[in-house]
Amino acid sequence: MQVSLLYLAAGFIAIACSSPALAGEDVGAGHEIYQTQCSPCHSNQPGVNGIGPSLAGLAGRKAGSLPGFHFTPALQGSGLTWNADTFIQFLADPSKLVPGTAMTVTVPDATGRANLFAYLATLKDTTTAAKPSGPAAPKITGPTEVELEGAASATDAWLYASHDYAGTRFVDLREITPANAKSLRPVCLYRSEQAASVQTSPLVYQGVMYLTFGRATVAIDAKTCRERWSYIWQPKGQEISPANRGAAIKDGKLVRGTADGYLIALDMADGSLLWSKPIASAASNEYLSMPPMIYGDLIIAGPSGADFGSKNWVGAFRLDNGEQVWKFNLVPDPGEPGAETWENPESLKHGGGSLWTPLSLDVKTGILYLPVGNPAPDFYGEIRPGANLYTNSVVALDAKTSKLLWYRQFIPHDVHDSDLSQVSPLFATTIAGKKHDVITVSGKDGLLRLLDRSSQEQFYEVPITTRENVDALPTVEGVHRCPGLLGGMEWNGPAYDPGSNTLFIPAVDWCGTFSKAPKDPPFVQGMHYYGGAVASDPREKSKGWLTALDASSGKERWKYASPTPLIAGVTATSGGVLFTGDLNNDFLALDANTGQVLYRFNTGGSIGGGVISYALDGKQYAATTSGTVSAFFGGSGPPAVVIFALP
C-alpha cells in the first residue's frame, strides 16, 4: 500500500492509493491506509472538512489530474505504485467500518464529487517570492532581548506565542471592560489564499501582526489588516504533517519551522528569506510544528513526529545563520541517562517524545522548561517496557548549555497518547503564607498541576475535564476512556491574571474508545506508528470547559461550559475581560469574575489558534485567528484573522 501526497502551492491535499490487487484483504488494507494516512487531513463525511476537503466526494472516481498538480511519494523508496481502485472501492462501500474505529463511510452523489473537484481547481498556484504591497517598510531592528524579557508588561505588542517567556497570556489593558464589551465590533478581516489549518499564534510588534498559515507567512497592519508582505515556503523534502503553530521574532528576524523540517528566517521588514537550515526530516519521521523560542542569540526548537515513530530532541541554533549550538535528546541514546527506562533497547529508535507546543523560560535563572509529548507506538506498550523517559515529562534545562537541571515524569509508560502539552504560565504566588516561584503543568490527561520551580514540590493537581476509566489499558476489543485522544489540554495553555491571582484554563471534553493492535505493530517508514487506534465519541458528544481557579489553592471560582471543545488561546486582561473562541466559529469575550459571556461574534471560521489583545495609539484591540482547525477537530472557513475594538 502507498499514500501519495498531491501538492498545490496553495496547500496540500492527501489522496490515498493502494496496490493494484482488488482482493478483499486489500480492501481491508485500504481501510487501514485511510485511517492512518488520510484521516489526519481529510474526513470521509460529506460537508465535514479537515485541513483539506472531505474525501467522500472521491467515491467512484478514477485517478486523474488537474492543471498545476504534481505528485510526491509519501513513502519514498518503497517501490509501491499508484492505483486508486482499492481506495475507491473502500469509499464506495458505506456498510464497512474503518478498522479500530466506529467511523463509517458515507458516499455522496455525482454532484458532490463534482463540487469537490471544482473546489480543487480553484486553488491558486503561488511562488516563494515575497509580495510587498505599498511602499517598502523601514528596516526593523527589534524586538531586542530587553523587549523580549520585558514582554510580560508590554501592552502594545505580543512578542511570543504565549505572550512572554513565562507564558502568562495576560495583558495590562483596561479599555475593554465587562460594562462595555457588548459594544465590541469587528474592525477588519484578513483572509489568506492558502489552504491550511489554522493553529497559529499571532505576534504583534510595532503595529504589525505576523502569522503563519501552513507554508505561508504573512505580515499585516495590526489596525487595518492591510497586508504588508507574504512569503510562501516551497518544500524541499517530504512533508509528514502540515500543522504550524506560529513563529518567533527578534532583531528584525522572523523564525519559523516548516513541515519538511527546515528552520527559516525571514526579514521582518519585507518577508525576504534570510537563511534556511534543515534540522529535521521525514527520513527521521520528523517535522516542525511548534512555535520556536528565541533567547539571546539562540533559537530553541525541536521536532514533532512521535505518532510516526520519530526519536525526538530539542536543539539550540544561532539566530544569525541557523547553525546548531547544542542538542538534548528527549528520547535518550543508548548509554545516556534515562535510556535504562526503555527496557527494550530497540524501542529507543522510534520512541517518540514530540515537541509541539510553546516552551517557557525563567529569564532570572536562565532555566528552560519543556513539555515533552507521548512515547511511540502510542497505544501498544508491550514493545517499549519501562517508564520511557523523558516522554510525558517536564524537563528543565540550562537554556544556554542544555545541561539537565531536573525533570519530572507525570505519566510513565503512557499508552493513551496523553501528551504533556503545557509548562506555563510561570509566576509567583503565596501559599500557606510563603511566596513560591511556581510552574503550571498540564496536558491531554486532563489534569493541571502546580509545582514549586525550585523544590519541585507539587501543591495541587486538579481535573480540568471529565476523567473516567483513566487507568484502563487499551485492549484489542477496545475500552472506553475519558479523556479520549482529543481530550484535555491541547496546544494553547492557561492564562494567569496576577491582579486576581486567577488561572483561566481551556480544555476539551471528548471521550473515546482505545484499542491496541492484536500483535506487535511493525514500524513502517512514513506511516503512523500507533499500534492501535482511538474511536472518538460522536462529535455531538464533545464539548469544552473554561475553568477559573484560585492560583494558590486550585479551588474553582467558576466554570464556563462550552458547546464545543475549547482549544483556542485565552487572553486575560486587567480590564476584567477574557478573550477566546470556539469551534462554533464564535469569538468570545467573557467576564473574568463570573465566566458570563459578554460578547459573541461569528467570524465565519472555527477558532483553534491564538486569540490576543494589544493597544496601538491608545486604543485596545482584540484579534482572533479563524478557519479550519484540523482533520481531528474539524472546523470550517479559510485561514483568516479578525480584529475587534470598541467603536
Image: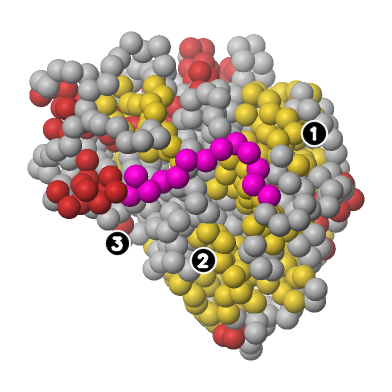
Q: CA distance from mark 1 to mark 3?
A: 46 Å
> Can residue 134 be seen here?
yes
Q: Amino acid at mark 3?
A: Glu
Taking 129 as reference, is 139 above or below it? below
Residue closest to the eye, 488 or 147: 147
Residue 591 x/y as whole percent: 59, 79
Do the residues under discs 3 and 2 have CB atoms within 8 angstroms? no
Q: Which mark is residue 540?
A: 3
Residues drawn in magenta: 119-132
Which mark's residue is nearer the viewer, 1 or 3? 1
Q: Residue at x 59, y 81 (%)?
A: 184
> Can residue 491 be seen here?
no
Specify whether 340 is left or right of 545: right
Residue closest to the eye, 312 or 212: 212
Q: Residue at x 32, y 36 (%)?
A: 66
Q: Residue at x 71, y 57 (%)?
A: 134
Residue 40 x/y as whole percent: 38, 40
Q: Secondary structure at mark 3?
A: helix
Q: Residue at x 33, y 40 (%)?
A: 39
Quarter of image, res 361: top right
Q: Which residue is mark 2?
A: 581
Q: Which residue is mark 1?
A: 319
Q: Secondary structure at mark 2?
A: strand
